[in-house]
Image: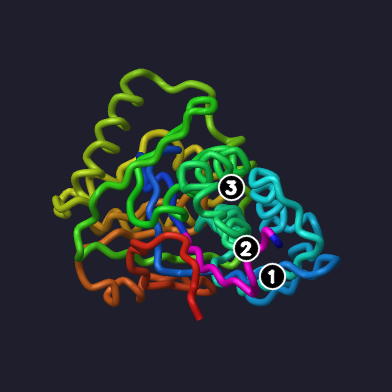
Amino acid sequence: MSPFAPGPVTVEVPATSANLGPGFDCLGLALDLHDTLVGEVVDSGLVVELEGEGADRLPRDERHLVVRAMRRAFEALSVEPPGLVLRAVNRIPQSRGLGSSSAAIVGGLALARALVVDGAEALDDAAVLRLATALEGHPDNVAPALHGGFVVCGHDGADTWAVNAPVAPDVSAVAFVPPDGVSTEMARGLLPAEVPHAVAAANTGRAALLVAALGGATDQLFRATEDFLHQEFRAPAMPESLALVHSLRSDGLAALVSGAGPTVLVLTDGDPEALLGRCPDGWVAHRLAVDHAGVRTVVS
């Protein structure tokens, strides 16, 4: 009897915004913009078909991040498919700070376990989070892609954790996406090795306040999204993004750099439509609700 479930199988995985200002490497939010992955186990070979964001430059072989994640999940499940077909429709902008790589990792892991009989029992969400964090390097994007909603997370060696925190129903976001991306490695390379104790303490206070602000104290969103640890240090890599953050915050809007940038995200409990006019020329604005489902298998 084959260990593989009949295909094709379809999963959808959301975009994410990590850090959210002060929550460096520990806070993440899932957003209602999804990549769709369709996978099937076949007799031989590997076929990768792509459309949408990055389709003209992403690899179509074993180097593709979804395929790498699938292989890792199959290895954890002690199975090896004779052949694979992957079809990906990418809607999450690539290298823009909206979790495209985390979506690929979480989506690939979820797709692989759905293609294995009883895969969800053998590879539960806790195991998927550990594998995804090992592949990504930190959990603040992969955890909300997996669980949905607003997630407080972290890891210390093999110990990885993620806890969902409440989000007030009137909270939504607007993402301003620039035409060019910034690599996470470049953005991280601009960060100092140390910061003063007072700066770390101030940032901790803002991150704690953000949990309360998103959970219902939405009048505190502006104060709670003030960052002291990373955004200003990254300005040389994304000066237009930081200029937009400053402009929006000067008007009392809860603006921040999404993830490692360069997308700028505004959290709001008001009408997001009113923010769309602040989009710079050549950028693209997305009105985004919070995604509470996380990665999911689509039943046709």
Q: Residues within 10 Å of mark 1 (few under 14, many from 20)?
A: many
Q: Do labels 2 and 1 touch, CB within 8 Å?
A: yes
Q: Is residue 75 visible?
A: yes
Against 142, is 247 above or below?
Answer: below
* Label 3 – label 1 distance at C-alpha: 40 Å
Q: For residue 237, which numbered disc appears in the image?
A: 3
Against 248, is 137 above or below?
Answer: above
Residue at 35% in and 76% down:
277
Against 224, is 264 above or below?
Answer: below
Q: Going by the picture, which residue comes out furthest to the top?
A: 197
Q: Earlier in the sequence, mark 2 or mark 3?
A: 2
Q: Is residue 181 visible?
A: no
Which callout, 2 or 3, points to the residue nearer the camera?
Answer: 2
Q: Give coordinates of residue 218: x percent, y percent.
A: 17, 54
Task: Tell me the SS state at disc 2.
Answer: loop
- For the record, the magenta segment spans 3-15
Q: Residues within 10 Å of mark 2 (few under 14, many from 20)?
A: many
